[in-house]
Image (cartoon, rainbow, N blue to C red):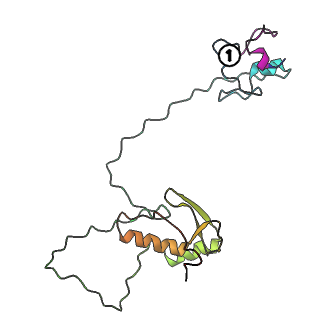
Amino acid sequence: MGLADRFSGQGPIATPEITCPRYEPKPGSKRCKHYLKGGACALPDEFMCVEWLKANGHAVPEPLPPVEVEPPPPMPPPSSAPKVDRDLFGQPMERAPTPRPQHDDAPEPRRAPDQEVPVVRNLTDEDVASFKALGVEVCLATEDCGEVWLVPEYTGRDDRKEISVRDAATLAAVCSAFPGARVTSYQRPAADDAS
């Protein structure tokens, strides 16, 4: 007769008195509330049920002192420090200065048409080259875009979304140019639409 049968509340228990100091019967049953199927014990510092071990002819280890679980420390109050923007790798970024309101009569600064706007990014070319040299592929889980793989070079796989580390750095720079902007969708055009 197994322990499950002995503690099921059906019929008398044929074993000597229960010796487990942490035995707590379920209401209306003789089965301990810590007993798990197969003879395991639900207590964090016990592996197997002492009574199950005895009933099945196994040696019973010396009891360990009960583990006292300390409650987690209280959460600190919300910080009044300003929120820090972070780049793709979790590094703090400097906030772009808030633009001053322009008046209609103030001339707008002009840029020469052939002058290219420099891309501001937090990763150096050495950082990008270092990531490529590692040859690793990193899966980023995002709420809006799902899983996106950060890769040294595109692999052309159709079963996952990929972005190269260089393009991710460029994307981060574009998002930093528009304060509060974030990526909400990532999709590759179909082969028919690419032309």
Indicate the position of residue 5 as horizontal and vertical percent values. Answer: 79, 17
Indicate the position of residue 17 as horizontal and vertical percent values. Answer: 76, 8
Q: Which residue is mark 1?
A: 23
Residue drawn where x is 81% and y is 18% of the image: 54
Q: Is residue 149 above or below residue 119?
A: above
Dividing the picture into quadrants, the one containing residue 110 is: bottom left
Residue drawn where x is 38% and y is 87% of the image: 116
Q: Can residue 127 be spotted in the picture?
A: no
Q: Is residue 22 above or below residue 157?
A: above
Dividing the picture into quadrants, the one containing residue 176 is: bottom left
- Magenta-highlighted stretch: main secondary structure? loop
Q: Is residue 18 magenta?
A: yes
Say left or right for 105 vs 148. Answer: left
Q: Can residue 117 be spotted in the picture?
A: yes
Say left or right for 10 vs 58. Answer: left
Task: State which quarter of the image contains the C terminus.
Answer: bottom right
Dividing the picture into quadrants, the one containing residue 46 is: top right
Indicate the position of residue 85 as horizontal and vertical percent values. Answer: 39, 61
Residue drawn where x is 61% and y is 75% of the image: 154
The residue stretch that appears in magenta: 3-21
Say left or right for 128 vs 30. Answer: left
Residue at the outermost front position: 192
Q: Is residue 180 above or below residue 78?
A: below
Residue in the foreground of this view, choosing between 96 and 161:
161
Q: Is residue 50 magenta?
A: no
